[in-house]
Image: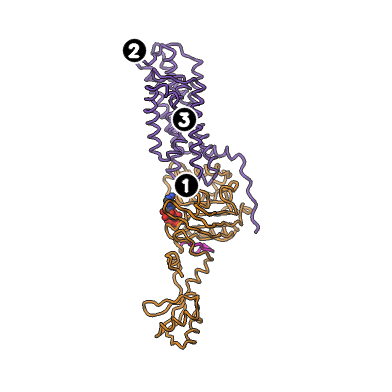
């Protein structure tokens, strides 16, 4: 896979994406529940949540495919269908988007380029970009999962858009493809474009994203830069013969910190540094046997957050 | 923020959408299969009319009458069955293969997409109609010498050809509308075939005064041919308006239901 020749700034580079109070109900199912977040240009934002959290539904609302029950979602301040020639400024690849099995990849893209007003000469360019240059004439019916995913991506890139909305783009890609996707998305964000990528695994996008928007059962759990999540994963492990006293001392002195007793009798203190914990213990005259900084696996933090029992 | 400027709306967007819909048709092989089907169907119709033994008192006009000759050449309009099914598939396939998402992402003004699709299928239907007419006429003229027959109604042939092309175009549009309204591919095909080949045929045969107002009856009107004996049909212009009315009414209804429906 190769990058395209450098172009002048793509249209709509530098525009944010905004979701405000978005709610979508499918019959009895509340798929998205009063969701608000922003996506900044020039950064890659990971849109994360477990299966059924409402990621795809949110993106479909944003792209005008699903009518929200209430709330709004805009791209560069406009709802999708009010953007003139939207496919030229917003590139998107969504889950549950298919291809006619009897149509070649090239013809699929030619259809889209005609419909959206993109120059048809972009078709071979994007096919090369996603590594399908040699398979463009083949019917999509014979494509592998990864090849379909690449074709989906090619369709998103067709208009050379300043805003990219990709729903689980890494699904089905081989390690080489994932590595390419990572560097490609970083490169696009580096050009000032707005990039939103959804995933149900944090570790998949950990090396790609700058910001995260985490949702669970349709609600926002957390929106922050990834580093904040990494900080959140850091905690202090402390061991003492008198955990009960230390615990009360810590909760009194550090109201931000969450203190928990582990099975082996140690205390874990989140949102605190070892020196803070040491100071509290010293001031309370409590004997310590161990005091160290530790960090939880980021994926575990994600699981805790989306399970809904986060602090 | 130094946001890049707006993109000017693409000029000729409506024509581009029609071109995109036409490319959808020609970039898979289905249209070819349907064209082969059309030719076979018309061929069987023409041969059957020519070979039907002439019995005195039969309700089917014989080739020795002007009406019988019209009936023979009207077989060339048989492409309408394929045109309406193809039109229905034009929408149900998008739902079945989940390509509608891409279609509406490329052009979120859904009304325009619907109009473009119906226009494209109207064109495809007209082409089917034309191919059917050329083939049907050629076959009929080639086979006629084996049978006693009245004079070939040359001027009527132009009018039948025009009726067939218009009728097939409008049936294809009607097909897109039916496919959009029913959504399920199997249901749409079944309903169309049962309606066109069974329900209408029965109504036309037994309640001709009502039958002539149905789409198939109106098609008989634009072809000025009963197909089967005993039926009535409307004058050409009235029949053409009735067909146009069906296509416009169902087309508008289909576009309307598509307007806000969730695409998931
Ligand atoms: N068309 C629909 N009709 C009814 N319910 C729906 C529809 N689309 C989505 N849902 C429901 O809405 C909820 C959110 O689904 P959504 O596809 O948005 O989740 P997701 O976060 O994309 O999940 P995944 O990681 O599995 O892709 C689910 O409970 C799903 O069953
Ligand atoms: Mg999803």
Q: Which residue is mark 2?
A: B55
In the rendered image of this protein, which colour is used for chain A?
orange
In the rendered structure, the colour chosen for chain B is purple
- Residue at label 3? B171
Is any part of residue B110 visible from this angle? yes
Region rendered in magenta? A204-214
Q: Earlier in the sequence, mark 3 or mark 2?
A: 2
Left or right placement of residue A8 versus residue A139 in this view: right
Position of A155 relative to B84 (above/below): below
Q: Which mark is residue B263?
A: 1
Residue A49 falls inside the magenta stretch: no
Marks 1 and 2 share the same chain: yes
Query: Are both tags, 3 and 2, on one chain?
Result: yes
- Mark earlier in primary sequence (3, 1): 3
A130 relative position to B227: left or right = right
Residue A180 visible in rendering:
no
Tell me residue B230's x, y (percent). Answer: 39, 17
Q: How far apart are labels 3 and 1 at the CA level?
A: 26 Å
């Amino acid at each position: 896979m190769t990058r395209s020749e450098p172009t002048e700034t793509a249209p709509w580079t530098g525009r944010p994406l905004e979701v405000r109070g978005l709610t979508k109900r499918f019959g009895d199912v509340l798929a998205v529940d009063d969701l608000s977040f922003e996506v900044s240009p020039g950064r890659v934002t990971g849109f994360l949540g477990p299966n059924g959290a409402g990621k795809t539904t949110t993106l479909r609302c944003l792209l005008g495919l699903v009518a929200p029950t209430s709330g709004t979602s805009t791209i560069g301040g406009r709802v999708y269908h009010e953007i003139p020639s939207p496919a030229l400024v917003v590139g998107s690849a969504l889950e549950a988007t298919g291809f006619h099995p009897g149509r070649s990849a090239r013809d699929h893209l030619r259809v889209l380029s005609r419909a959206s007003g993109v120059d048809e000469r972009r078709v071979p360019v994007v096919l090369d970009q996603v590594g399908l240059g040699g398979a463009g004439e083949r019917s999509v019916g014979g494509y592998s999962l990864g090849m379909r995913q690449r074709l989906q991506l090619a369709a998103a890139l067709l208009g050379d858009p300043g805003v990219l909305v990709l729903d689980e783009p890494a699904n089905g890609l081989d390690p080489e493809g994932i590595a390419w996707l990572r560097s490609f998305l970083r490169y696009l964000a580096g050009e000032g474009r707005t990039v939103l990528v959804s995933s149900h695994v944090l570790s998949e996008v950990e090396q790609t994203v700058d910001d995260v928007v985490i949702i669970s059962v349709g609600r926002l759990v957390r929106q922050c830069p990834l580093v904040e999540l990494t900080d959140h994963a850091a905690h202090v492990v402390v061991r003492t013969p008198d955990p009960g006293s230390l615990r009360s001392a810590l909760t009194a002195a550090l109201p931000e910190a969450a203190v928990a007793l582990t099975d082996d009798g140690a205390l874990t203190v989140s949102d605190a540094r070892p020196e803070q914990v040491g100071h509290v213990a010293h001031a309370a005259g409590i004997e310590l046997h161990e005091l160290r900084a530790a960090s939880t696996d980021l994926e575990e933090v994600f699981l805790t957050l989306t399970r809904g029992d986060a602090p | 923020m130094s946001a890049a400027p707006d993109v000017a709306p693409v000029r000729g967007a409506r024509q581009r959408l029609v071109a995109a819909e036409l490319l959808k048709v020609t970039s898979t092989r289905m249209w070819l299969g349907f064209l082969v089907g059309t030719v076979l169907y018309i061929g069987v119709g023409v041969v059957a009319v020519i070979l039907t033994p002439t019995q005195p008192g039969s309700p089917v006009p014989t080739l020795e009458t002007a009406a019988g000759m019209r009936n023979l050449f009207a077989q060339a309009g048989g492409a309408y069955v394929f045109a309406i099914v193809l039109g229905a598939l034009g929408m149900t396939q998008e739902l079945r293969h989940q390509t509608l998402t891409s279609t509406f992402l490329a052009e979120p003004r859904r009304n325009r997409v619907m109009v473009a699709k119906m226009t494209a299928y109207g064109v495809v239907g007209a082409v089917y109609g034309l191919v059917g007419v050329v083939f049907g006429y050629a076959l009929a003229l080639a086979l006629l010498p084996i049978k006693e027959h009245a004079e070939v109604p040359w001027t009527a042939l132009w009018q039948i050809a025009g009726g067939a092309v218009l009728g097939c175009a409008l049936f294809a549009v009607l097909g897109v509308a039916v496919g959009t309204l029913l959504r399920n591919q199997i249901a749409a095909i079944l309903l169309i075939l049962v309606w066109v080949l069974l329900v209408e045929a029965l109504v036309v045969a037994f309640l001709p005064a009502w039958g002539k107002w149905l789409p198939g009856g109106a098609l008989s009107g634009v072809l000025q041919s009963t197909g089967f004996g005993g039926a009535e049909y409307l004058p050409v212009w009235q029949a053409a308006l009735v067909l146009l009315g069906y296509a416009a009414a169902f087309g508008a209804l289909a576009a309307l239901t598509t307007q806000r429906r969730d695409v998931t």
